[in-house]
Amino acid sequence: MNRTRLLTTMAVFVAIGVITAQLLWFPAGVARAYPVQHAINVMAAIILGPGPAVAIAFMISLLRNMLGLGTLLAFPGGMVGAFLAGYLYQKFGKRALATVGEAFGSGIIGALFAVPFAQLLIGSSVGALFFVPSFLVSSITGAMIGWFIVSKINYEKLVRI
């Protein structure tokens, strides 16, 4: 994939992530669940790889925060899941592993990273037990949506275009 096509595809993923943040979310414990973010992480990880997927997750989190549509907790949750999904897909070539990587990366590891992140940046002292269920609900729901979408498209043909 040439650089222009890569950047354009990344921009489209970012735009979808930011727009849907105000349209499709639900409360999940201490956080808001944005399942489309996790679906985008899975799709970007499979189609583009771990580096672009992490960059997309970062940009969506940054823009959502700048627009007042999200919290700082979007950074650790989205970026860790995107990386793990991309890494597992790159290493093993299985879409299901990308889905599991997103759910585990965002739902467990991202939630654990959110604890000190929340303490330092937000001033909240809640523990991991408050973040893990919320992050898991969001990441599992979104990862399944992303897996479903990717399983229905011929993404290999998209990459070659």
Image: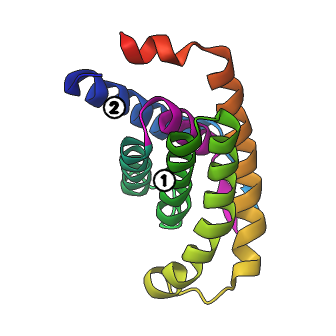
Between 91 and 36, the one nearer to me in the picture? 91
Dot 2 amino acid type:
Ala
Label 2 to label 1, Cα distance in Å? 18 Å
Quadrant assignment, res 81: bottom right
Q: Are marks 2 and 1 in contact (CB under 8 Å)?
A: no
The verdict on residue 92 being magenta is no
Tell me residue 160's x, y (percent).
38, 13
Q: Residue at x 40, y 37 (%)?
A: 14
Q: Which residues are magenta?
A: 29-49
Q: Residue at x 68, y 21 (%)?
A: 151
Between 131 and 42, the one nearer to me in the picture? 42
Q: Residue at x 56, y 61 (%)?
A: 77
Q: Is residue 159 above or below residue 81?
A: above
Numbered label tally:
2
**CA neighbours of label 2 inside 10 A, class few (<14), some (14 to 19), many (20+):** some
> What residue is disc 2 on?
11
Q: Quadrant of the N terminus?
A: top left
> What residue is disc 1 on?
83
Q: Quadrant of the C terminus?
A: top left
The main secondary structure of the magenta stretch is helix
Between 146 and 151, the one nearer to me in the picture? 151
Q: Residue at x 55, y 35 (%)?
A: 20
Quadrant assignment, res 36: top right
* Residue 161 as seen in the image, left or right of residue 86: left
Dot 1 amino acid type:
Phe
* Residue 101 as seen in the image, left or right of residue 10: right
